[in-house]
């Protein structure tokens, strides 16, 4: 059965723009039928710890003799890996926080980017996630359009494209919605209509993408 792993990392459970778009994607996915299953993980409600041991960067067989890992830490990491490897499609809610990733999402990435397990190393050449689909939903308070003055300030989407796309070999699609602070920042008041239109378009596109994406 086609399976979706849905991650949210917004710290705002009430009015998050990225959560609204990932929810639209999940609706579109589930409307395809009962066979289209979902595992949802809220990285804000149940945050992964910062990587507790550098040895977790490596598959167990690649660790040195003096690298021992707490069994509880290894069990937690294996849970994240099992969820990811079981997914045909990965959906990541990634709001821009201070021009970068939420720390909870970065911690999750550190747990699942494992040399010799999810990425090649030495004689291990497999990339088990290669060819699968990843959809990144990134909300941001201002505008960071490609070619704009602030485009280079976006340190949210590029790291995800590197890890999920280049390293894991996944096919990455990105949905962005900008100007999400327009309703709260007086100086952005004249952009509120544009912000609302972008949010509506992002939700609609997410639902359409989920309805037609190969799994």
Image (cartoon, rainbow, N blue to C red):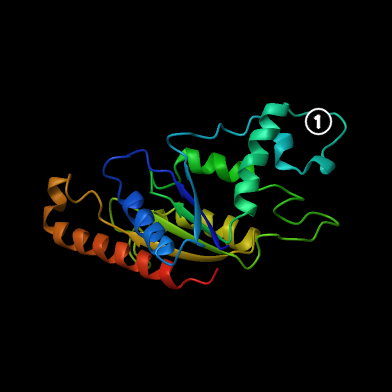
Asked if residue 183 shows in the view, the reply is: yes
Q: Position of residue 76 (x, y in %)?
A: 63, 34
Quarter containing the N terminus: bottom right
User: Looking at the image, which residue sits at the far front?
Assistant: 34
The residue drawn where x is 65% and y is 60% is 129
Where is 53 relative to 149, above or below?
Answer: above
Q: Quadrant of residue 110?
A: top right
Say if residue 53 shows up in the picture. no
Residue position for label 1: 67
Instruction: Judge left or right: residue 137 versus residue 163.
Output: left
In the image, 21: left or right of 123? Answer: left
* 42 and 174: which is toward the camera: 42
| Residue 173: image location, x then y, percent | 47, 66
Residue 12 rendering spot, x and y as whole percentages: 32, 39
Judge the density around disc 1: few (<14), some (14-19), many (≥20) Cα neighbours within 10 Å. few
* Residue 201 picture location, percent across and down: 27, 66
């Amino acid at each position: 059965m086609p399976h979706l792993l849905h991650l949210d990392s917004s710290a705002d459970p009430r009015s998050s723009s990225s959560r609204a778009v990932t929810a639209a994607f999940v609706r579109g996915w589930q409307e395809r039928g009962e066979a289209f299953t979902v595992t949802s993980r809220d990285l804000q409600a149940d945050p992964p710890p910062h990587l507790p041991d550098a040895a977790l960067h490596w598959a167990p067989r690649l660790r040195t003799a003096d690298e021992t890992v707490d069994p509880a830490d290894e069990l937690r990491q294996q849970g994240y890996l099992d969820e990811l490897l079981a997914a045909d499609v990965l959906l990541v809610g990634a709001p821009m926080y201070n021009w970068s990733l939420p720390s909870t999402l970065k911690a999750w990435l550190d747990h699942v980017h494992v040399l010799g397990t999810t990425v090649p190393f030495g004689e291990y050449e497999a990339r088990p996630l290669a060819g699968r689909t990843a959809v990144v939903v990134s909300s941001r308070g201002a505008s960071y359009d490609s070619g704009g003055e602030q485009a280079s300030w976006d340190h949210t989407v590029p790291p995800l494209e590197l890890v999920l796309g280049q390293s894991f070999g996944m096919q990455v699609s990105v949905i962005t919605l900008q100007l999400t602070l327009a309703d709260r920042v007086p100086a952005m008041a004249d952009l509120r209509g544009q912000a609302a239109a972008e949010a509506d378009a992002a939700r609609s596109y997410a639902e359409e993408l989920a309805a037609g994406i190969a799994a």
